[in-house]
Amino acid sequence: MKVGVLGCMAERLKAKFLEEEKIVDLVVGPDAYRDLPNLVEEVEAGRDAVNVLLSKEETYADVSPVRLNSNGVSAFVSITRGCDNMCTFCVVPFTRGRERSRDPQSILEEINAMHEKNFKEITLLGQNVDSYLWYGGGLKKDFKKASEMAKATAVDFAQLLDMCATRFPKMRFRFSTSNPQDMTLDVIHVMAKHRNICKYIHLPIQSGSNAMLKAMNRLHTREEYLELVKNIYTLIPEMHLSQDMIAGFCGETEEDHKDTLDLMEKVKYSFGFMFAYSERPGTLAAKKMEDDIPLDIKKRRLQEIIDLQQRHSLYRAKEQVGQIQEVLIEGTSKKSQDQWKGRNTQNTVVVFPKENYKMGDFVEVKIENCTATTLIGKAVGYSDNN
Ligand code: SF4
């Protein structure tokens, strides 16, 4: 048996895997899929095989992914690779390279292939989807050097989303992840225009304190973020937002932490991904900042953030009790063989009795009860989206 490691951490860990622990034969970076046949030949000839070069062009537009363990209902489609933002805590710009976008035609073709296989929901995926920009290929940072013709015909994220939702009206669309500094109101207007774009945005901020946002090199302030959130809730009142938060980043004071709790109170996210800060080797924070918050303080602040999020999740769930919501059936509930589970447009999990409905159906469900993470209901009929 030959063992290989493929992905964005391969470059970081290649010495450990190949030389120190000698546990793998093959180390392949995220931009080297096309080199796999050669690398496998190298391994078969008895040599270690490594390709961790990052590409300026590669978007794998014409490589159709094989979707293992797919539920046959929902799928991810990659639209950008890399990230040009240099958040000081994040390793992505070093492991995934500079930002480049995929040709919209190839994105539509991949979605069409999913549509023909009866998939019902697509999540457009990238490190920073709102930064999507197709102008004929190449790095986003080189856009200003493009020809006037290329600039005039460029496609941004709002336009791409509009194209997808218009061309496939019976499919549902989500996207992830958004960086607030790159999100435009055009995207929100497109979301408001199309029923089949889900009313949910994962909108990480990482901290509610301006001092921490600056230290993290997030290129927006707390006030700008709250203004964006206000505009989103005004244009789409039923929108749900989720967050990423880091507790105990370098230099974080008790006041900074309170700003995070205060911001959460203002936004009332429906859920979140919350972590105590830990250094990632190679990042600007690891090189230049002191990880100076004691672990017990980090843990206490994290727990306060988690507790508050639990309260807000329950608040958002309770708001939905009594509503009739469209749910896409994605599988059997983990807790009961007799219940389906699916998600509503806000990305909340909904469970309800199976009756005669089947996987992939869009069903109208009356929400009767809830926990902080799950809505519990009863189907009242098919949605007209089927
Ligand atoms: S946190 Fe997100 S936006 Fe910031 S560098 Fe990492 S991938 Fe890019």
Image: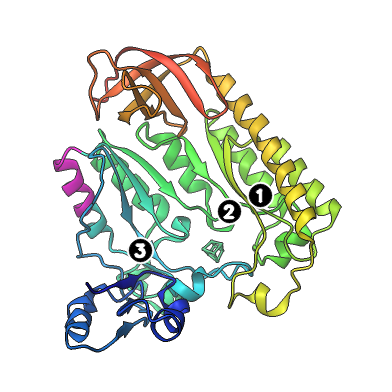
Residue to which mark 3 is pinned: 154
Mark toward the start of the polypeptide (3 vs 2): 3
| Amino acid carrying mark 1 in the image | Tyr
Nearest to the observer: residue 62 or residue 182: 62
Q: Is mark 2 within 8 Å of ligand 1?
A: no
- Residue in the picture at 41% in, 60% down: 132
In this rendered view, identify the residue nearer to me: 77 or 39.
Answer: 39
Q: Position of residue 12 (x, y in %)?
A: 47, 78
1 or 3: mark nearer the eye: 1
Residue drawn at the location 33% of the way across and 70% of the way down = 6
Q: Which residue is mark 1?
A: 225
Query: Which quadrant: the N terminus?
Result: bottom left
Residue on which disc 2 sits? 180
Magenta-drawn segment: 109-118
In magenta stretch: residue 155? no
Residues at marks 1 and 3, CA–CA distance in whole angstroms = 27 Å
Helix, strand or loop status at disc 3: loop
Indicate the position of residue 50 as horizontal and vertical percent values.
32, 84
